[in-house]
Image (spheres, grey):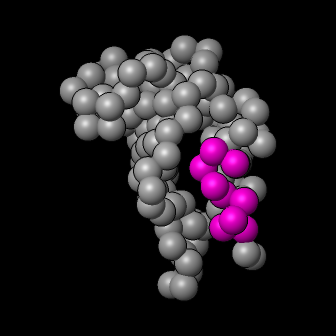
């Protein structure tokens, strides 16, 4: 499964967040991580994010580029600096703080 979700609306004055979620098939943790991430993005980055889901069972070679050692792993590519969170992303506060989304909440 390799899937990209583009923002539904864009704003020229706000940076588009680029996120990658590395998963391994349709495991419970992978499915939960994707559902949680979509929810957080729609709540806090609506229209300002691009999400790429990479299934390492189908594309194992892609793990090397972002140095993925565990799954699921979320990688924030943009804005800089790169940040990573490992796990099913069920702790919303940890995800928002880890990605530094709180500082980008100017709606």
Residue sticking out furthest to the left: 61
Q: Is residue 84 magenta?
A: no
Q: Residue at x 60, y 19 (%)?
A: 29
Q: Residue at x 34, y 23 (%)?
A: 56
Bounds of the magenta span? 97-105
**Left or right of residue 11: residue 22:** left
Residue 80 x, y percent position in the rendering: 44, 60
Residue sticking out furthest to the top: 27
Residue 104 x, y percent position in the rendering: 66, 67
- Looking at the magenta stretch, what is its main secondary structure? helix
User: Above or below — where is 84 with respect to 19?
Assistant: above
Q: Quadrant of the C terminus?
A: bottom right
Residue 97 x, y percent position in the rendering: 69, 48
Instruction: Specify the quadrant of the image occupied by residue 81.
Output: bottom left
Q: Residue at x 37, y 28 (%)?
A: 68
Viewer-closest of 95 and 44: 95
**Left or right of residue 68: residue 9:** right
| Any part of residue 31 in sight | no
Q: Quadrant of the N terminus?
A: top left
């Amino acid at each position: 499964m390799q899937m990209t979700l583009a923002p539904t609306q864009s704003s020229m004055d706000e940076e588009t967040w680029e996120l990658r979620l590395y998963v391994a098939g349709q495991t419970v943790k992978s499915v939960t991580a994707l559902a949680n991430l979509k929810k957080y993005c729609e709540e806090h980055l609506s229209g300002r994010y691009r999400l790429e889901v990479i299934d390492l069972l189908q594309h194992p070679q892609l793990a090397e580029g972002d140095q993925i050692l565990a799954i699921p792993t979320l990688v924030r590519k943009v804005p800089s600096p790169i940040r990573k969170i490992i796990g099913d992303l069920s702790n919303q506060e940890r995800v928002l703080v880890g990605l530094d989304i709180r500082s980008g909440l100017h709606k």
